[in-house]
Image: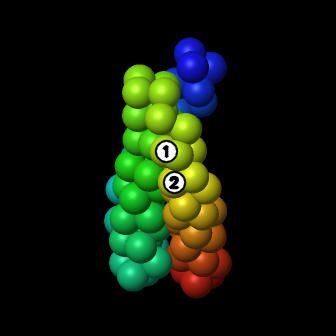
Amino acid sequence: MLQVFDTGQRYHMFHALALLAVAWASTRWPVGPVAAAGWLFVVGTVLFSGSLYALAVTGQRWLGAITPLGGVAFILGWLALAWAAWASR
């Protein structure tokens, strides 16, 4: 369970840094996709890392079924950020 918790905190840390990148990007690129990326990173962190934290603490295996939804939110967040960068060209 320590490895599960470690995975959750690693993705949490990376996407906290991504949120800082979103804050920077919001000053330079179109607001819509950047805002969407920020919210998707927040949702992804809550679903992905939160479900892994809860799984590690409680041992309830069904919480692992929520984790992929957070992963999808992370992917969509990165795509939205890339779209904002592309649209700014």
Mark on residue 55? none
In the rendered image, residue 49, in percent from the top left (x then y), is placed at 47, 40
Q: Residue at x 55, y 38 (%)?
A: 61
Residue 16, can we see it? no
The one nearer the camera, 74 or 78, is 74
**Label 1: how many residues lie within 10 Å, few (<14), some (14-19) or many (20+)?**
some
Q: Name the residue located 58 percent from the left edge and 83 percent from the top edge.
A: 87
**Alpha carbon separation for disc pair 2 and 1:** 6 Å
Please state, as top left, top right, bottom left or bottom right, where the N terminus lies in the image: top right
Q: Residue at x 41, y 34 (%)?
A: 54
Which amino acid, by three-letter code, is at mark 1?
A: Leu
Quick check: 38 left or right of 67? left
Residue designated by label 1: 63
Displayed quadrant of residue 79: bottom right
Q: At numbered mark 1, what does the secondary structure look like: helix, strand or loop? A: helix
Disc sitting over residue 66 in the figure: 2
